[in-house]
Amino acid sequence: MSDSAAAAHAHHDDSHYWKIWAILCALLVVSVIGPLFEIRVITLITAFGVAIVKAYMVAKNFMHLNIEKQYVIYLLLTMLVFVFLFFAAVAPDVMKWEGDNWVKPYVAQESSAPAHH
């Protein structure tokens, strides 16, 4: 453990980590209950908004990124940029509904199956 990480751990007692863990568990409950309302905006906010907050809290409190050398943060940001670039590159192909040799069996089954009430 580096000197700065040891100093950060010494600064926080174990109750700090339990408090962060409890907050993360509460946010988990919110992100699970949110989609039960079946309102798209609420689902998106609870799914993505809460996930971003939880990721920030884990990185700040458990990974101690706020006390690491500056290049670690640059590496993390670079990796996130690569993830977004990958998503932007594959999303047009993956999110298509039709095309040559493009089959989504679950879509075909839903549209061709008779409606049962």
Image: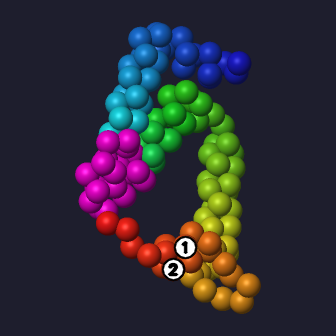
Q: Is mark 1 on a helix, strand or loop?
A: helix
Residue 112 has which mark? 2
Position of 83 relative to 57 (above/below)? below
The magenta stretch is: 31-50
Q: Is residue 40 magenta?
A: yes
Q: Is residue 79 visible?
A: yes
Q: Can residue 66 be seen in this view?
A: no
Q: The residue under label 2 is which amino acid type? A: Ser
Q: Residues within 10 Å of mark 1 (few under 14, many from 20)?
A: few
Q: What's the residue at 42%, 53% (across, down)? A: 48
- In depth, the one of 90 and 117 nearer the eye is 117
The x, y position of residue 3, in whole percent, is: 67, 18
Q: What's the residue at 67%, 57% (across, down)? A: 78
The x, y position of residue 43, in whole percent, is: 34, 55
Position of 25 relative to 41 (above/below)? above
- In depth, the one of 86 and 13 nearer the eye is 86
Q: The residue under label 1 is which amino acid type? A: Gln
Query: Alpha-carbon distance for marks 2 and 1?
Result: 5 Å
The x, y position of residue 115, in whole percent, is: 39, 73
Q: Mark 1 points at which residue?
A: 109
- In depth, the one of 8 and 89 nearer the eye is 89
Residue contact at pointers 2 and 1, CB within 8 angstroms: yes
Quadrant position of residue 24? top left
